[in-house]
Image (tube, rainbow, N blue to C red):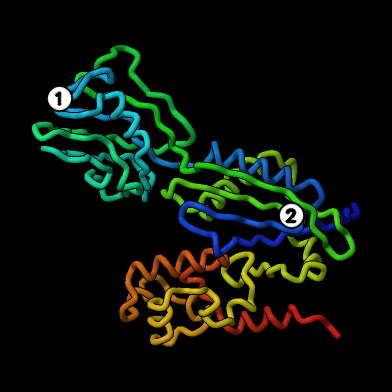
């Protein structure tokens, strides 16, 4: 049977707006897309980002001295209902996705904040200035928090057999999603003489427990995993069939598996680390250690980077965030010979 030939699809270039990229906001531009694909992909990603991304939240609490959410607390300005509303706004980063516990103990006149909470090692509190309650001079606030992972929204999981729990536990609604807001715009863009292609701009706001790059990676993984089950036979390899698009869209990066990942630009890897726009401290530490090119940097492991003089974890985190914007990371192990071969392959034949 003769093998069927398929027409290639336009493969988009993905670019993060580096000047706007933070732990809580990211703006991604994908272009060019096939006509009509902007709305299709934008809406699918938006819905999955809202409903499908994992996070962690407080699902129940034990407040010393009370056993239901309609009680009043002696020496505390807020009643338990107001306290619960404040607790719902605690932002927790879960490093390993497992349940955990946290504890708050405040005695005497004070403003109880998230920063006063102690938590398990795998949990990290993000919005430490968030106010939970106001305690009077003779008051005391003692709370144990139970944190669970999940997706989307989950109502309070009260056991069906009894309203009051033996340990005084109060169950509360939980919003697990780290996503605060997702918007997308679709415009027309040009490829060669054609002006009907789509340009998708995706704007992602998070609560700070996850960054926009990671949540988008998660959402795409969810979408791709779900769609794979709709395949009736072997997937049509459009990525391989569509390699000629770059000639009409010169800003496109080259997909090279041998460079440790997709979307890596060989030209970028040979540029000096100044392209990453690092802080003066991080930049000088790397230069003094002989790390002058981006290629030299991505070939380091995180442990090797931390051994550089005066290069601490704060600098490491900054450099990692900067590299993420270009689709790079530590430990890519890219050989310069592979890089030169990739550049040679890109040269047009005479």
State if disc 2 and disc 1 touch (CB < 8 Å): no
Estimate how packed mark 1 is, as few (under 14), some (14 to 19) or many (20 or more) residues with alpha carbons within 10 Å. Answer: some
Q: Where is residue 44 in the image (x, y as percent from the top left)?
A: 66, 41
Q: Is residue 151 left or right of residue 56?
A: right
Q: Quadrant of residue 68?
A: top left
Identify the element where label 1 is drawn. Answer: loop
Q: Where is residue 80 in the image (x, y as percent from the top left)?
A: 26, 24
Q: Answer with mark 1 or mark 2, whichever residue precedes in sequence.
A: 1
Q: Where is residue 17 in the image (x, y as percent from the top left)?
A: 59, 61
Residue hosting label 2: 199
Above or below for 2 versus 116 = below
User: What residue is at 21 percent from the left and 33 percent from the top?
Assistant: 143
Above or below for 135 versus 36 = above
Identify the element where label 2 is drawn. Answer: strand
In the rendered image, the quadrant that contains the C terminus is bottom right
Which residue is at the front of the view, 6 or 43?
43
User: What residue is at 13 percent from the left and 38 percent from the top?
Assistant: 109
Estimate how packed mark 2 is, as few (under 14), some (14 to 19) or many (20 or more) residues with alpha carbons within 10 Å. Answer: many
| Mark 1 or 2: the one toward you | 1
Residue hosting label 1: 74
User: What residue is at 47 percent from the left and 36 percent from the top?
Assistant: 151
**Residue farthest toward the left in the current orientation of the protein:** 138
Residue 234 in view, yes or no: no
Residue 264 in view, yes or no: yes
User: What residue is at 31 percent from the left and 49 percent from the top?
Assistant: 122
């Amino acid at each position: 049977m003769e093998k069927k030939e398929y027409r290639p699809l336009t493969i988009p270039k993905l670019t993060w707006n580096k000047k706007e990229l933070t732990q809580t906001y990211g703006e991604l531009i994908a272009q060019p897309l096939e006509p009509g694909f902007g709305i299709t992909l934008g809406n699918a990603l938006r819905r999955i980002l809202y409903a499908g991304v994992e996070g962690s939240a407080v699902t129940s609490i034990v407040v010393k001295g009370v056993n239901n959410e309609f009680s009043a607390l002696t020496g505390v300005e807020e009643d338990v209902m107001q306290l619960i509303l404040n607790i719902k706004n605690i932002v927790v980063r879960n490093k390993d996705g497992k349940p955990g516990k946290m504890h708050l103990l405040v005695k005497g006149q004070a403003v109880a904040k998230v920063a006063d909470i102690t938590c398990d090692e795998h949990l990290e509190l993000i919005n430490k200035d968030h106010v939970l309650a106001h305690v009077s001079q003779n008051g005391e606030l003692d709370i144990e928090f139970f944190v669970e992972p999940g997706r989307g929204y989950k109502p309070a999981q009260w056991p069906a057999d009894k309203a009051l729990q033996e340990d005084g536990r109060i169950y509360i609604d939980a919003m697990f999603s780290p996503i605060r807001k997702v918007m997308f715009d679709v415009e027309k863009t040009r490829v060669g003489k054609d002006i009907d292609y789509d340009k998708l701009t995706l704007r992602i706001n998070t609560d700070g427990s996850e960054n926009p790059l990671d949540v988008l990676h998660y959402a795409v993984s969810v979408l791709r995993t779900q769609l794979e089950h709709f395949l009736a036979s072997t997937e049509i390899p459009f990525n391989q069939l569509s390699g000629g698009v770059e000639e009409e869209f010169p800003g496109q990066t080259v997909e090279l598996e041998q460079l440790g990942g997709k979307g890596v630009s060989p030209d970028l890897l040979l540029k000096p680390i100044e392209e990453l726009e690092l802080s003066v401290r991080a930049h000088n530490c790397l230069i003094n250690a002989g790390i002058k090119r981006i290629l030299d940097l991505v070939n380091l492991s995180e442990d090797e980077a931390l051994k550089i003089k005066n290069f601490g974890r704060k600098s490491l985190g900054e450099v990692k965030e900067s590299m993420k914007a270009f689709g790079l990371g530590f430990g890519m192990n890219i050989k310069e010979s592979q890089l030169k071969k990739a550049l040679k392959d890109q040269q047009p034949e005479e």
